[in-house]
Image: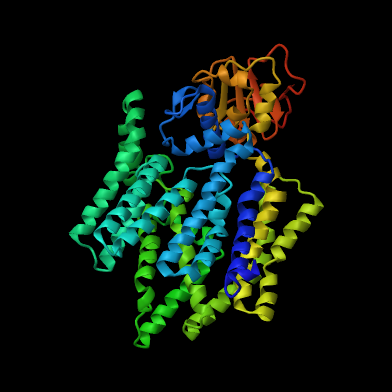
Amino acid sequence: MTAGMGISTSSSRWAALAGLGATLYLLPLALSWPLLDPDEGLHAAIAQEMVEKGDWLVPRLFGRPFWDKPAFYFWFEAGSLAALGMNERAVRLPGLLFALCGTLSTAALAARALGRKIALPAAAFYATMFLPMALSLAATHDVALVVWTNLALLMLWESLWAQSAAHRRAWIFGAGLALGLAMLTKGLFGVALVLTAHGLYLVVSRRLASAHIVQGLAAVAIGAALAALWFWPMHRQNPGYLQYFFIERHFLGLFGGTQTHGGQPFWYYLPVLLLGGLPWIGYLPPLVRDALDRRRSGQPAIDPPCRDAVVWLCCQLAGCTLLLSLAGSKLATYLWPVFPSVAILAAHAWQRWLDGRLSPEAATMMRRTLLTSCVCGPIVFLPIALVAAEKLDLHLSGAVWWAIAAAALSPLAVLAVWRRAGLPCAMGTAVATTALQFALAVLFVLPPAAEQLSARRLAQFFNEQAAMPARVRIVDERVGSLVFYLRPQWREDLEPGRIARISARLAAYEPPPLALVVPENRLRRLRRHCDVHHWPFVTVGRHRVYWLPPIDASPPAVRSATDPAEPSASVRP
């Protein structure tokens, strides 16, 4: 890894990148941990039903059309499940492949904008940023969207510098295809990000002309024509779908706070950007300081050869973050397409530092940032692990804690390499230690943590019963991995409404017969509305399963909740 980040041969660079890719995108497939709720389990259950029911047009859950997401990512998950079987690796394979493609497309974006020397560091920085690295493990649609936004931006960028009208039209057509795939992945969300970033650059650089508006509209029209191949048949089978998806989900999600994930403050994405971009986002302030120092000395703030590219990347970072901050619906994963620009700008800062082209003050900031990141690792990493273990009720062995301690101390190796081998090797070592921490987390921490974030044990409990309960209600938790892990014959009989999420307030009004599933962390909320003092229950992992009325042949683990420590509904905890 050390050799791959600056002055080594081309073959060792690619070998280092291959090793990094294997750590980040192959190692998770070598292990098996349960699907995480809510999103990973939910998407897996929908893809599973797509395979088992043979309907590849309409995503469904319990036979009901699922309108919140288009079908594109479900197709990849369903294809993986059909080919590899109903298991966790098949669910995660598409997400990891798209994460790898996001890294490669970031390298392509960096190479075309700032030169090939930036490509590999930018790819390594993006792959080892906290948010992209962590979310690559979860099967979400956003991981595919990053690929299409990167490609659309790249092709629009190339169209600005095309030497002929034919080449320009080809780039616009390619951008349109990428936008169409973005629509099939998450609707108009990716289109809005791409047009905001590209349009802001045209305005800031004073290049905006009527021809650019026509080209942008042409790209959107091409994308819409491609996306219509699925959206229109979907609407024909489900009247009202287009109005719901594009008006309620998009328009109201942008301008109102009443939709899903609404009500967040304007500054919501600032900590997401700062924490999700660690450890590499810290190298952007020195780049700003260098521009200010150059301007004070009478030089252009940005070197003319790379000025357009740097401004373009800054427009992506600032424009997309501002757009998302203005939207009423906010979620951390929505910011994911912004991180490639952060990685490329950080790689640009490092390259200028290595080449000695930063101002003395900016170079000092780079050194302080690197030193701080190395020292803060041991200080912060271990307490975070302790808090996470307590919150998730993890009982880790001594060997695991030794591995966590090694991961916490690993950034100190960067200081030793920096002193002995210089900056290029120190940068490579920083990438390697970040990947090492990820690998140790995947090997030792994630499997037991996933047991606390999954309903696999709950599904196994129902699978052991003679029959599936007539009605299952889950308090304040989305239905996801529970469905995926049920017996195939149980899933075949799951008509709409048989398993559903319910609020604690409404649980008291559910008529029996009923299996009421309550996560332990929602038990206090349930007690405020229901007198569960005499309800029989089974403890299954992190859930309690209450039986209403008590079943005649209760499983051996069922016991009556007659403990005097169990407060009644009249006592507010």
Q: Looking at the image, which residue is at 42% across and 36% down? A: 69
Q: Looking at the image, which residue is at 71% across and 66% down? A: 409
- Residue 35 in view: no
Residue extending furthest left? Answer: 210
Q: Where does the N terminus fall, quadrant-wise? A: bottom right
Residue extending furthest top? Answer: 552
Q: Looking at the image, which residue is at 64% across and 35% down? A: 520
Q: Is residue 437 above or below residue 246?
A: below
Q: Is residue 236 left or right of residue 43?
A: left
Please state which of residues 260 and 66 is positioned toward the viewer in this rendering. 66
Residue 201 in the image, given as x and y percentages of width and height: 31, 64
Q: Is residue 380 left or right of residue 219?
A: right
Please state which of residues 513 and 381 is positioned toward the viewer in this rendering. 381
- Quadrant hosting residue 165: bottom left
Its colouring scheme is rainbow
- Residue 189 in view: yes
